[in-house]
Amino acid sequence: MAAAVTRKIKTGNFRAAVRISCSQDKPAEPIDHTLRALLAKHPAPPSDRRKPLDPANYPHFQPLRIESETVKKALRTFPPGSSGGPDGTDMSPQHLRDYLTDSELPMAITELINRTLAVTNSVRKQVRKVLYGPGKRPLA
């Protein structure tokens, strides 16, 4: 717990540091009862569920596109002290917010996102792990 509180204080997230310090929560025990409770909350999808359509087979499909203002708004929603990556050493959302006044950065991020959305199914597996995190896949 001390390490978690220290990390939050170092990143300036004092609210989270106090919340962790005052919390009586602890990690769930890795036992069958816990697993059953989690499975009850998050059941598997029905076996007769239709598979999603592959947009590559439909010539009228237009990939999702977002606007630069949407990116700016999303970047402003990260709470103070948010980590930039799993170990907290990457560029943090606060760094990005600090550069929002630069008109080129939001446009570059928007373009990267839109290009990624347009080619998501053709992005190599190794790159997907970086973009979506390990074990996560795009919707399509």
Image (cartoon, rainbow, N blue to C red):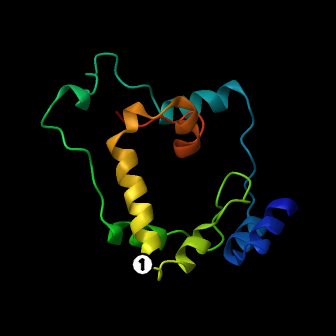
Question: Which residue corresponds to the image point at 71% horizontal and 41% vertical from the top-left?
Answer: 28
Image coordinates of residue 139 in percent, x first then y, are 37, 36
Left or right: residue 118 compared with residue 132: left
Residue 94, picture quadrant: bottom right
Question: Which quadrant is home to the C terminus?
Answer: top left
Is residue 34 placed above or below 76 in the rendered structure? above
Image coordinates of residue 81 in percent, x first then y, are 66, 71
Residue 56, picture quadrant: top left
Q: Disc 1 marks which amino acid?
A: Ser
In the displayed image of the protein, which residue is found farthest to the bottom? 101
Image coordinates of residue 45 in percent, x first then y, are 38, 25
Left or right: residue 58 compared with residue 28: left
Read off the residue under disc 1. 103
Callout 1: few (<14), some (14-19), or many (20+) C-alpha neighbours within 10 Å?
A: few
Question: Which residue corresponds to the image point at 74% horizontal and 73% vertical from the top-left?
Answer: 18
Question: Which quadrant is home to the N terminus?
Answer: bottom right
